[in-house]
Amino acid sequence: MPESAKRLNLVQKIIQAHLVSGNPVAGEEVGIKIDQTLTQDATGTMAYLQFEAMGIPTVQTQLSVSYVDHNMLQTGFENADDHRYLQSVAAKHGIYFSRPGNGICHQVHLERFAVPGMTLLGSDSHTPTCGGLGELSIGAGGLDVAVAMGGGPFYMTMPKVLRVELKGKLQPWVTAKDIILEVLRRLTVKGGVSKILEYTGQGVKSLSATERATITNMGAELGATTSIFPSDENTREYMKAQGRGKDWTPLTADPGATYDEELIIDLNKLEPLIAQPHSPDNVIEVSKLKNVDVQQVCVGSCTNSSYRDLMAVAKMLKGRHIHPSVSMTVTPGSKQVFEMIAQNGALTDIIASGARIIESACGPCIGMGQAPPSGGVSIRSFNRNFEGRSGTRDAKVYLASPEACVACALTGKITDPRTLGKPVKVEVPEKFTLDDDGIIPPAKDPKKVEVLRGPNIKPLPIKEPLGETLEGEVLLKVADNVTTDHIMPAGSKVLPLRSNIPAISEFVFNIIDPTFPKRAKEAGGGFVVGGENYGQGSSREHAALAPMYLGLKAVLVKSFARIHRANLINFGILPLTFVQASDYDSISQGDKLEIPDLKQVIKVDHPFPVKDLATGKSVQVVHSLTDRQKEIIMAGGLLNWTKLKNAAAPAGKPVAAPKAKPAKKEKVK
Ligand code: MIC
Ligand code: SF4
């Protein structure tokens, strides 16, 4: 091997050590072995129904954890039914169960399970949080996670590796959140698509593990496959304080390693930043926003709810009072954080200030309560501010650091925290409070476990295999950057229906056009036409599954977000990209489209025509499917494909979940 080939960056090292198939060259499909998986309840019920359908008795990963953190408002039987199902199915199949109240999946996984150099696949787009500890952590649809639990590889297009060099040191009141907001300002919400961000440079040393996790968490908003930091002394310090020092290994890029792209951020020059409505990349200096009245402030979410963040909030609030026109909520990210701030008295300072305390869960971040008032301004330490996501259609949600949030809560206006005087400082504790009572291990005798299903859990709809021709109406035409929150909204009314596809499908595209479900059913399905970065945001496969149930056959766009495109394929919906982006303009909502010789065009890799029967014109599109994906689409989705393969395979050898070949001997160093 030539000397230069050995100089690997951190991403290449981990991928090499987990490679099951393919050549890890940007743009080619690779399959990687997955060491750990995580699910959360809103995506987990489907993932476990799919895992059960595979007929594999015990998960084949080193560790699989099922978290309950999203659907926490039990306003009816639905969420409680799902929790009970998740607990029993976990016990039966070798999965750890993190109970409701134990915390937000990403925060708890970072605290208790993440290991540098391992791979983690999670059915939540913010799975990259654990990249803060040097774990290669990727968000995916529930079906992909189910396959990984069965021991199957995770397939992805090998991303480019973008080196982000952090120079200098953060100035007082400037935080990790401001670093990722700056990256978002520079790269935009589609700037990370098909990329992994690897952080390097002197500035890395000054960031604690949870500060790094804030940055890798919100890398999801760039559309990146994931983000990762090296594992160094700070990683060791954190893992030791979590009683997991023995799981620590140092891990960094080789000196002289090469990268596909580079970005340099000078921390000395950063100021407190804020993302304005309605996109996480609409970033500006906080100091530039003057005289904006604030009605709500929320600190929490998987981005900013660590011990460090909550202590900073408590120190700022100590002896002060929330402005009378502001409602402030504070959410500790985990039971560990909650217990610790209760033990050391910080919680008292938060309560005394007039803030409202919320249980450790996603809560307001996903519209589970705390919707702002009509037209209200809400400043949040969260990661997404898409229109309507808060539960109030016309609310104006801004994203900022916990420190900037508190500054706004104290003054009632958008306020630069630097105006508050001496900055607060929080040290990483020498020892975190360790109490894993909220994590229930799998049953010792799985045969005795009965899986409990309530009436909320309905069977998974399955699509027909592909026909000879694809034809139908353009049911909807949408603009750039449409999010999965637009396609399949969440919030307290809709999220409880995640295990019931017929019921949840009535809300598809509700924010854009509430007539969509009725029209789609009446038309017998059809097409959606979209702009750039279609399907950005969450990993929810319901944004493919529910439209599939309504008859969606193909989506034609200028470009896709990674996870959503993978979910469309998994559920048999054809993802097509315009060869000429300007052809988007020639198609109108209501036009009838036709793709003849479907099976033939799927087989080829070059552009093919889609006929617009309304205008008589044809537009050229590509599907960019790999051979494996072509088979999946022809079969009508991954579940059908698996069944077909299993029928053809020798008895007892399921195909969708072949045991990944053992990782290459080479250890990640
Ligand atoms: C989100 O932040 O949008 C969610 C809710 O966590 C989603 C998952 C889901 O929709 O269940 C995500 O980020 O993947
Ligand atoms: Fe939960 Fe919000 Fe994080 Fe999604 S982004 S996992 S809803 S806290």
Image (cartoon, rainbow, N blue to C red):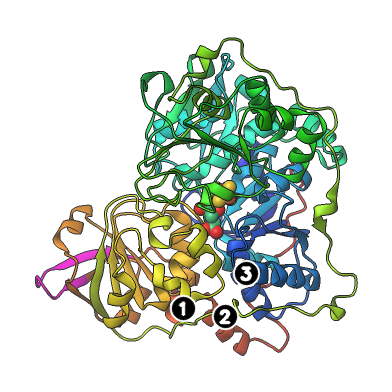
**x and y percentages locating residue 502 in the rendered image:** 46, 78
Viewer-proximal residue among 97 and 415: 415
Q: Secondary structure at mark 2?
A: loop
**Residue at the front extreme of this rendering:** 324
Q: Secondary structure at mark 3?
A: helix
Q: Answer with the quarter of the image where residue 66 lies.
A: bottom right
Q: CB at mark 3 closer than 8 A to ligand 1? A: no
Q: Which mark is residue 502?
A: 1
Viewer-proximal residue among 411 and 174: 411
The residue range painted magenta reads 610-622
Q: Residue at x 31, y 51 (%)?
A: 532
* Residue 228: in magenta span: no
User: At label 2, which amino acid type do we have?
Assistant: Lys
Q: Answer with the quarter of the image where residue 210 lies.
A: top right
Q: Residue at x 74, y 40 (%)?
A: 338
Of marks 1 and 2, which one's residue comes earlier in the chain? 2
Q: Residue at x 37, y 42 (%)?
A: 278
Q: Are marks 1 and 2 in contact (CB under 8 Å)?
A: yes
**x and y percentages locating residue 125 in the rendered image:** 54, 52
Q: Residue at x 79, y 80 (%)?
A: 450
* Residue 615: in magenta span: yes
Label 1 environment density (alpha carbons within 10 Å; few <14, some 14–19, many ≥20): some
Q: Secondary structure at mark 1?
A: helix
Viewer-proximal residue among 663 and 511: 511
Residue beneath disc 2: 458
Residue beneath disc 3: 45
